[in-house]
Structure formats: structure tokens, C-alpha cells
């Protein structure tokens, strides 16, 4: 169970994604993200169930800050079995379960509002471990680069490296959850 996550999130074009995918020389791994929200949705709080292979990980994230493409979030995770995961998808997650899993008090129950499929390529580039994502949800596809680091200076250095080495334009990205909600509102 993690507690604090500091992560650079950059929006990529398909061309930029393809450049980095060629550099990675690693095949993407599929992950399915089921998103949950209460009736009164707060964009700073996200509850997700991620399926990767046969494993399901429930995750609670509360965004603390967001500046220059770097998000700092309070994050907690726990593994759940496949049967329980299916129950969560079908009926939602009660506030009591949120407390049991993550020791976080919430006022409302959360309900599954849909899924987003990510094809993630995790690879090493110089001193950084990068996660290159192709995301599909509703009728949309988008691309993103993520990098976690405890050192803000390292993330600033990464932005310069990407620009000067690969011509990547630095565009801070909003969270997948926010993009998913925006697309859901249009459908």
C-alpha cells in the first residue's frame, strides 16, 4: 500500500507516442480500469479497480497538488480477488468498504461508471522509468507519458531531455479519470 505519489503526466500526440514506443522496444500490456464515483463526484478523489492479467487492484487516490504537469496524490492500493472485483463492478463499493480497504472515510457509496482500457509500455530511458500509455474509452483514443519520482528536479530534467532528444512538446495532462468523465459527459 503506497501513500504518496509524485508523478509527471504529459499528453502526447500519436506521432510522439509512436516515437517513444519505437525507443522502448517493449510490447504494451493491457490493463482495464473500472472507475467508480459517488453521486456528487469530486475530481480530486478517484476510486479505480484495475485488472491486469488475472490480478485486480483497488486504488483510492486523492490529488493534493497539480502544477507544471506534476501531480502529487495520496494513494492507497489493495488487491481483491476476481469474484469480489466482479461484485464491486456490479453493485459498487460502499463507504464502509472504502474505509475497510483504504482507512479513508467517505460520505457516500461509489458506483461503477465505466471502463477505460490502457495499453501500457513500461521501459527505462536514461535514468527514468517511464510508462507510455495508449488509452481507449468510449469512441476516443489518447496518449500519455507518466513518470514517478521522489525528486522534482529529476522530473524537470526529464521534460528537457524529452524535448531536446525526441522533439516531444511538453503538454501537461489531466488525469485519465478526468478525461474519462469529460468523454462520458459527451456520450
Image: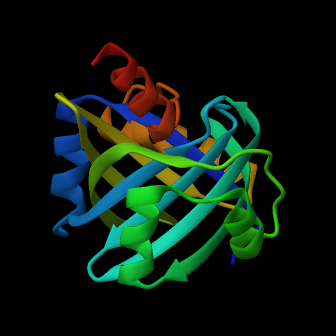
Query: Which quadrant of the rendered structure holds the C terminus?
Result: top left
Give residue 102's position: percent from left, percent from top: 74, 69
For image coordinates 41% across by 76% down, the residue present is 56
Nearest the eye: 79 or 26: 79
Give the residue at the far top of this rendering: 186
Is 39 left or right of 186, judged from the image as shown?
right
79 versus 21 height, above or below = below
Give residue 33's position: percent from left, percent from top: 37, 55
For image coordinates 61% across by 46% down, the residue present is 46
Nearest the eye: 185 or 87: 87
108 versus 74 height, above or below = above
Give residue 28's position: percent from left, percent from top: 20, 64
For image coordinates 24% across by 62% down, the residue present is 24
How are the colours assigned in the image?
rainbow
Is 2 left or right of 181, judged from the image as shown?
right
Is 178 left or right of 56, judged from the image as shown?
right
Residue 130 visible in the displayed image: no
Nearest the eye: 117 or 4: 117
95 versus 69 height, above or below = below
Amino acid at each position: 500500500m503506497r501513500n504518496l505519489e509524485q508523478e509527471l503526466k504529459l499528453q502526447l500526440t500519436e506521432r510522439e507516442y509512436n516515437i517513444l514506443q519505437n525507443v522502448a522496444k517493449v510490447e504494451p500490456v493491457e490493463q482495464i480500469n473500472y472507475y467508480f464515483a459517488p453521486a456528487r463526484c469530486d475530481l480530486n478523489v478517484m476510486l479505480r479497480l484495475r485488472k491486469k492479467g488475472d490480478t485486480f487492484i483497488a486504488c483510492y487516490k486523492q490529488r493534493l497538488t497539480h502544477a507544471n504537469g506534476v501531480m502529487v496524490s495520496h494513494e492507497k492500493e489493495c488487491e481483491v480477488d476476481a469474484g469480489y472485483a466482479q461484485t464491486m463492478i456490479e453493485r459498487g463499493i460502499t463507504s464502509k468498504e472504502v474505509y475497510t480497504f483504504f482507512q479513508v472515510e467517505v460520505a457516500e457509496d461509489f458506483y461503477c461508471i465505466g471502463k477505460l482500457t490502457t495499453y501500457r509500455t513500461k521501459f527505462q530511458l536514461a535514468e527514468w522509468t517511464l510508462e507510455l500509455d495508449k488509452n481507449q474509452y468510449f469512441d476516443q483514443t489518447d496518449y500519455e507519458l507518466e513518470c514517478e519520482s521522489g525528486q522534482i528536479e529529476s522530473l524537470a530534467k526529464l521534460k528537457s531531455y524529452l524535448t531536446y532528444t525526441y522533439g516531444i512538446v511538453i503538454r501537461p495532462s489531466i488525469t485519465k479519470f478526468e478525461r474519462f468523465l469529460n468523454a462520458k459527459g459527451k456520450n
